Amino acid sequence: MKLRLDDGTELFYTVDDFTDPWTEPETVLMHHGMAKNHRMWFGWVPTIARHYRVIRFDMRGMGRSDVPEQGYPWSLDNFTNDLEEVVSKLGLEKFHLVGETVGGSISMNYSTRHQDQLLSLTVCTSPTSFDSHHQESASLIEHEGIEAWVDDSIGRRLDPDLVPQEYIRWYADQMKATPAHVVQGFQANAGGDLGPALRNVQTPVLVLAAASLREEVLGDFRGAADLFPNGERVVFPGITGFVQHILPTACARVWLDWVRSL
C-alpha cells in the first residue's frame, strides 16, 4: 500500500495483524534505519503481530518508497517530518513506536515533539548524537559507491559466527539497492545531539543493544536509556553487532514482555 505525503512523495507501508478478530489491538509502528526497508523487521513481526497491529513503512528514498532527485535536503528533522505525516495520514492517535539505528534516532526526535501520542518508545542500536563517522561514510560513498560502504560496514552489523552467510548476503543486497545519493546525502548532513531534549520525554523507553559493536562508531547508544526519565536498557551479553537483526525473535520477545509490564 502507498500513502502520499503533502509534497507528493509516496511511501510504501504494510500492515500485519494476526490478533484475535474480536479484539481491538493497539498499534505498533516500526521504523527501519538508513539504507534499509520494512523487510528488515521480518524476524520481529510473527511474535508481535499476534498481539498487536503492526505497521511497517519504507522511508523516503528507500525500499518501495519514492526516491527524491539529487539535491533534496536530507536531515534527521526532515525524516522526522515524514514520520509525523505517516502518523497523521494513517490516523494514529496513540501507538507504540519501535525504531532501529537511524530509524531509532528519528523516533527519539519524534518523541521530543509528540510524546503525548506514544504509548511506548523502543530504540535499537540508535545514536543520540552524530559525529565524524557519518561524514567519513559520506566520503566513502561519494568516492567508491554504495557497495563499498555496505561491504565495509556489514561485518559491524552482522556477526558471521551468529548468522548464516545467506542472511548476510540478503541483508547487504537490501542495503545496496538504496540509491547512493540518498545515503550519502544524509550522512554528509548528519549532526547534532538529541540528548538534552530527551530528558523532557516522559514516555516509557526501552533501549535494546548488543554487548559490543565493532569500532563502537555510534557513540554511547546504550546510554540513551539514561537520558530518558523512564528509560530502561537491555543489553544482550556475548553479542557483537546489531542485535535487532542478529536476534530478532529474542528482541521481539523482550519487547513483548516489557510492554506488557507497563
Image (spheres, rainbow, N blue to C red):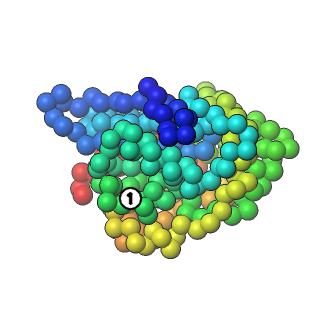
Q: Quadrant of the N terminus?
A: top left
**Left or right: 187, with 81 as reference point:** right
Q: Amino acid at mark 1?
A: His
State the residue lying farthest toward the right.
Answer: 143
Number of labels in the image equals 1
User: Is the residue marked by circle 1 packed among few (<14), some (14-19), or many (20+) residues within 10 Å?
Assistant: few
In the rendered image, the quadrant that contains the C terminus is bottom left
Residue at left 67%, top 50%? 73
The residue lying toward the viewer, choosing from 8 and 99, is 8
Question: Could you say where residue 217 lies in the image, as x and y percent from the top left?
Answer: 66, 59
Residue 200 placement: quadrant: bottom left
SS for dot 1: helix
Q: Residue at x 47, y 47 (%)?
A: 83
> Left or right: where does residue 63 sit relative to residue 231?
right
> Residue 17's spot in the image, x, y percent?
30, 30
Q: Is residue 80 left or right of residue 175?
A: left
Instruction: Compare residues 87 and 135 and report the one nearer the observer.
Output: 87
Name the residue beneath numbered marker 1: 114
- Residue 48 visible to an observer of this rendering: no
Q: Is residue 72 above or below residue 212?
A: above
Vertical side of 114 occupied by 12: above or below: above
| Residue at position x 54%, y 35% in the image | 8
Query: Residue 190, how many percent across, how many down?
Result: 66, 57
Q: Residue furthest left?
A: 22
Above or below residue 42? Residue 104 is below
Residue 229 seen in this snapshot: yes
In the shown orientation, is residue 173 left or right of residue 229? right
